[in-house]
Image (cartoon, helix red, strand yellow):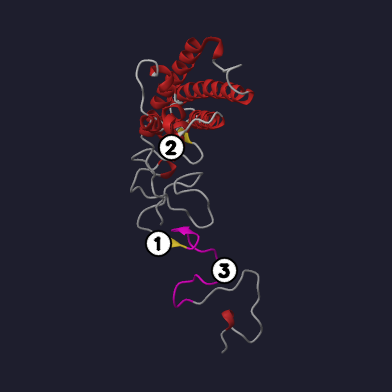
Amino acid sequence: MYRVPVQRPASGGTAVSAGVLAVLGALVGVGGLISVLVRGGGSVLGIGLVPGWASAVSGLVLFIDAVASILLFVGAVLVFRRRGAGPMLVALGCAGVVGAYVVAAVSVAVQLSEIGISIGRHLEAVFGQTNVNAIVGEVVEVPWPVSVLLLVFPVLTFVLAVLPSTRRWCKGAWAGGRPAAGAWAPAGQGPHGMRPGQQMPVMQPGHGAPQGQWGRGPQPQGQPRGPHGPGAPAPQGQWGHSPQGAPRPIDQGRQAPPNQPPNGFRQ
């Protein structure tokens, strides 16, 4: 008999880590938006100071940051509540954070090129487009390598959110006392609620019920198992199960041919 391997349930470590990082990312995103709006005043989009397309790009970046912060916060709440949609929302929020950073960096690089300023001498302006730079940029000058390394956090959060163990933990191992589709069996319990090492009930030939169920009582011990169940004699008139050395009976109601003994033996 083949034994079904018992799968261990997810511990939830990756899911909780993704949720914590998502909450931190949402708080940083909201702080960056507030800092930009408060410090920039009416010139946040650079209207009248930069080309028209740059103003549109700035507005797009702010919108993406706002949506990403909402997705991260809502996704983190759903992850902690073990909802299946939580990891997907966290992953989308992380993708929005990285996408907004790339769009803002490319926009600044193109603007510097248009006005004839060397990009190599203003790498802090190009790569310093994170929300952390927006929060502490007026107080502390963040080196551009540090700004780039800050992208490790949304990338790490994205990886934790899309891991199979995170999705499995958020979907929940059991629903209503029965395992959900693709769920793992809990530790110490095998398939069909059986314990490891417990034998499956023996199925009788011709019957789909285990012994002792559905009208058939427990079979007595020590009796030979016949072709029609343990201890049940074969019906008369059937072939192939007579005691060894005994003549096989002919079918009931069937006459032997004249001048020929029963069971086909010739005289």
Would you name the residue on which mark 2 appears?
A: 159
Label 3: state its secondary structure: loop
Q: Which mark is residue 238?
A: 3
Q: Is residue 174 left or right of residue 139?
A: right
- Name which residue lies at 47% across and 21% down: 73
- Based on the picture, tell me whether residue 245 belongs to the magenta stretch: yes
Lower position in the chain sequence, tag 2 or tag 1 = 2
The residue lying toward the viewer, choosing from 151 and 180, is 151
Q: Name above or below for residue 9 compared with residue 35.
A: below
Lower position in the chain sequence, tag 1 or tag 3 = 1
Q: Name above or below for residue 240 compared with residue 34.
A: below
Would you name the residue on which mark 1 appears?
A: 224
Disc 1 residue type? Pro
Label 1: state its secondary structure: loop
Label 2: state its secondary structure: helix
In magenta, the rendered stretch is 227-246
